[in-house]
Amino acid sequence: MKQNRIGAWIAIIIGTLYFFVPLLATFIFSLKMRRDEYSFDAYVAVFTDPQFQATFGYSTLLALLTIVVGVLLVVPTAYWVTLRLPKARPVVEFITLLPLVIPAIVIVFGYLRMYNSSSILPMTSSERATDILLLCSYVTLSLPYMYRSIDTGLRAIDVRSLTEAAESLGAGWTTILFRVIFPNIKSAILSGAFLTFAVVIGEFTMASLLSRPAFGPYLQLIGANRAYEPSALAIIAFMITWASMGLIQVFSRNAGALRSKAEQGH
């Protein structure tokens, strides 16, 4: 038993070093922009770059729109599957997992072939239409994470009893969804939203091939032409991802604590 614990601790230490040493080296290198001393000049240069502000704002806006569209698409679908079509769950899960097995470059080339300027629906003929196409691409890309989070939240509550109780009080489907189901899976929706934000904010392939000014192509451009700023951007991207994961943990713990209090009250 003791040898097993030692082996587990060795594995944890090796894994931690494998992850944190390159990150620490990147952070130290990002502080060496000024000769013979450490400074945050690389971070100042990044944050004051108008192109950084424009691309980060663009990706943030698209991430928020992706979350809204994804929630409005996935919650009713997962709710209906849970309530009325439980036998269709394997099919729906298979469809939602497809973006994980189909490379993003294949998806975006399919979009370009279907919606180019000579097609019936020319989504690449203007910047706004291409933005909508990129938004649809991000919704597709984030579908596995959003669906899994919401489906897990729906499995944790008694959907059928809640629906029947709401129907007995005269509530319609819209009221049931927005005033009964949404509040009860709020933490699951937030988990899916933070994962979606982390996925969209650093996405490169789709934004680059659709020629849109997103944060991912900006990262690639800076990495090819600057020395210290790419390291600062890498640290910033890690911090965004970790912040999203931390918020997921916070909301999950709060939801668990509220659920325990509710069960103790009964």
Image (spheres, helix red, strand yellow):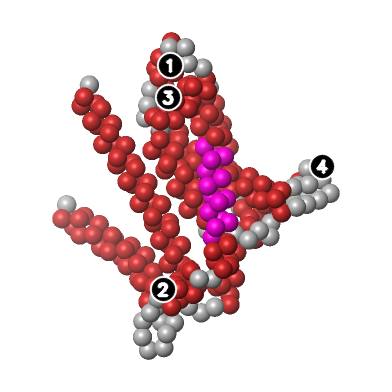
Res 26 label: 2
User: Could you tell me residue 86's position as x and y percent?
Assistant: 50, 23
Check contact, mark 2 vs mark 1: CB within 8 A: no
In the rendered image, the vertical position of residue 36 relative to residue 193, given as above or below: below
Res 120 label: 4
> Closer to the camera: disc 4 or disc 3?
3
Question: What's the distance in space between the residues labelled 3 and 2, CA to CA?
Answer: 47 Å
The answer to whether residue 164 of the structure is visible from this angle is no
Question: What's the distance in space between the residues labelled 2 and 1, CA to CA?
Answer: 54 Å
Closest to the observer: 166 or 114? 166
**Residue ID for mark 1:** 166
Q: Residues within 10 Å of mark 4 (few under 14, many from 20)?
A: few
Check contact, mark 4 vs mark 2: CB within 8 A: no
Query: Which amino acid type is shown beneath numbered disc 2?
Result: Thr
User: Could you tell me residue 182's position as x and y percent?
Assistant: 44, 30
What secondary structure prevails in the magenta region?
Answer: helix
Precedes in sequence: disc 3 or disc 2: 2
Closest to the observer: 48 or 106? 48
Q: Which residues are magenta?
A: 56-71
